[in-house]
Image (spheres, helix red, strand yellow):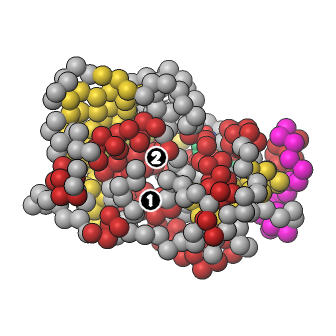
Amino acid sequence: MNRKNFLNNMGVLGATAIISPSLLAAESKEPALKNFASGKKIRVGLIGCGSVSNVYLPHLLKSPYAEVVSLCDIKAEKAEKAAKKYQVANWYPNIEQMLKGVSFDLLINTTDMQEHGRLNRIAILAGKNVWCEKPLANTYEDGRELLDLAKRKGIRLWGAPAVVNSPQFAFMAKQINEGKLGRIAAAHGHYGHEGPNWSAFFYEKNGGSLPDLGVYNIATLTGLFGPAKSVVAMTNVITPTRTTGNKGEVKVEAEDNAQVLFDHHNGVLSHIQSGFNYFDPYGHAGTGQERPTITVYGSKANMHMIGYDWKPLGVDMATIDNPKTQRYLTEPGTYVWQEGASVICECLATGKEPLINVEHSLHVLEIIEASRKSQETGKRISLKSTFKWPMV
Ligand SMILES: NC(=O)c1ccc[n+]([C@@H]2O[C@H](COP(=O)([O-])OP(=O)(O)OC[C@H]3O[C@@H](n4cnc5c(N)ncnc54)[C@H](O)[C@@H]3O)[C@@H](O)[C@H]2O)c1
């Protein structure tokens, strides 16, 4: 397929869709990994020894590219306990002591969402590469400043989620890019459950279902269709108080219910919904969720990702030539959602550029912020960020 056909299939030549050539060619000015890849194991310091660290650490400990040298938690006993459990030699009660302690190459930030930006800045100023759980910062402007700072320091910054790494995402992107779906009009993503009950930060200001759950679908749909130009959203709070493991009953300040509509540069209109009030028989691990959560409609085919986009189990596709739905990519591969930091260790060690890209993370963060602004103002909000696309 030539470029004209590709753009035509994506609706780029339509009256309402204008794409900047720089969008397709945009190159990052971040330092090339190959220039500082050492071939040695990457020394890792992980901050935030809570729920997600118990999924990250076993994966990192199996990686031939990572050596976990230190752990840190503001609740020092959690760091100490995790250090014993995972046999990590050093643990610290705060980031300042961690940075003064045993040296490391990559900070993995799995703390409360509200702390990400502040801790990432301290680490970057100290010359550490950073992999951060979502979101990278509380606001797009803060995230952008972090990236500028990282570039000035000659180091790298990345953010979860890792959904673009799945073979199912790659398959869908390939069908789209090869024009198999014809002219694509619309797509949808949904992800929700009954809400986490262990920590209050999910419900406090700058928490919410959008940065915790919606973020996956936003990363998937922008990954498939490219940067969005603008956003219209409605968000609200369905459950006004929550009982949490660490703070007891708290007032819910961040949206626990969100519907976001965006228009991509190529004219595709897509929509995601996320929430902490969805009856969910699949539990936090998503076991048994075998229904589509991402759906794409084109003039020549439709396509559905089976299971959550962070834990896909296959892709269903029906085409004009083969209208009976066929399921692809059902074999379990090596991809798991918690692989992001391990993949970054591999990339730092070998010099290979990862698919995950910080400009994409910043775009997703801008969409989350714009969604809240749209709710506050009742208006459609324009976006300024873009990222290198197509991704696959
Ligand atoms: N829990 C999951 O399954 C899961 C899955 C994917 C992503 N995430 C993301 O991971 C992040 C953490 O979530 P969690 O569920 O593990 O939360 P959690 O509350 O279980 O763990 C967070 C930990 O960070 C520590 N912490 C907070 N501020 C700190 C600071 N300034 N310095 C050092 N430590 C600090 C807390 O004491 C706590 O132990 C969030 O961004 C969340 O969205 C969680």
Disc on res. 360: 1
Horizontal arrangement in the rendering, residue 108 relative to residue 391 (left or right): right
Q: Earlier in the sequence, mark 1 or mark 2?
A: 2
Measured from the top left, where is residue 360 in percent x and y? 44, 59
Region of the chain picked out in magenta, as a range: 85-100
Give the image location of residue 249, x and y in percent.
62, 41
- Residue hosting label 2: 164
Q: What residue is drawn where x is 23% and y is 39%?
A: 180
Residue count near mark 2 (Cα–Cα under 10 Å), binned few <14, some 14–19, many ≥20: many
Residue at 42 percent of width and 28 percent of height: 329
Mark 1–mark 2 CB contact (< 8 Å): yes
253 in magenta: no
* Place of residue 326 in the rendered image (x, y in percent of width and height, measured from the top left): 30, 22
Q: In this view, does 51 lie to the left or right of 77?
A: left
**Nearest to the observer: residue 207 or residue 157:** 157
- Residue found farthest to the bottom: 152
- Element under disc 2: helix
In the image as oriented, which residue stretches furthest toward the front? 1
- What label does residue 125 carry, if any? none
Question: For the residue marked with disc 1, what is the amino acid?
Answer: His
The crowding category of the residue bearing disc 1, from other C-alpha atoms within 10 Å (few below 14, some 14 to 19, many at least 20), is many
Specify whether residue 276 is in view: no
Above or below, 190 relative to 144: above
Q: Distance between the residues labelled 1 and 2?
A: 10 Å
Q: Which amino acid does label 2 sit on?
A: Val
